[in-house]
Amino acid sequence: MAGKYACVSKKDCVACGACANVCPRGAIKVVDGCFALVDEKLCLGCGLCAKICPAGAVSVVKKEVL
């Protein structure tokens, strides 16, 4: 799981909050009832949010190393 984080497609997100509710670290928040936003520093990359998202708007991606 290290080196990964959740990424939300703002155009596909329906702001239901399912991802935020399932996140074990509280890394996801729904912004102004419009879309979910992930705090990459808190995200474990576990993928629970991607599995529960009814709109398929969440994916887990690799962190880029600089």
Image: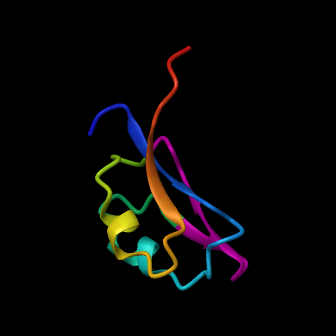
Location of residue 21 with respect to 62 vertically, above or below: below
Residue depicted at x 29% and y 33%: 2
Q: Name, please, the residue furthest toward the top.
A: 66
Height in image: 66 above or below 18? Answer: above
For residue 7, above or below residue 66 = below
Magenta residues, start to end: 29-41
In terms of image quadrants, where is residue 26?
Answer: bottom left
Q: Position of residue 34 (x, y in %)?
A: 72, 78
Total numbered labels: 0
Identify the residue at horizontal 47%, vertical 31% (top origin).
63
Colouring rule applied to residues: rainbow
Residue 17 image position (x, y, % from top left) = 50, 81
11 sits left or right of 17 in the view: right
Quadrant including the C terminus = top right
Q: Position of residue 38 (x, y in %)?
A: 54, 56
The quarter holding residue 31 reads bottom right
Give the side of residue 4 with respect to residue 58, left or right: left
Q: Nearer the viewer, residue 24 or 4?
A: 4
The residue under the point 66% across, 72% down is 35
Quadrant placement of the N terminus: top left
- In this view, 58 is above or below 20: above
Percent across and percent down for residue 3 are 37, 31
Question: Which residue is depicted at the point 64% across and 72% down?
Answer: 12
Residue 22 painted magenta: no
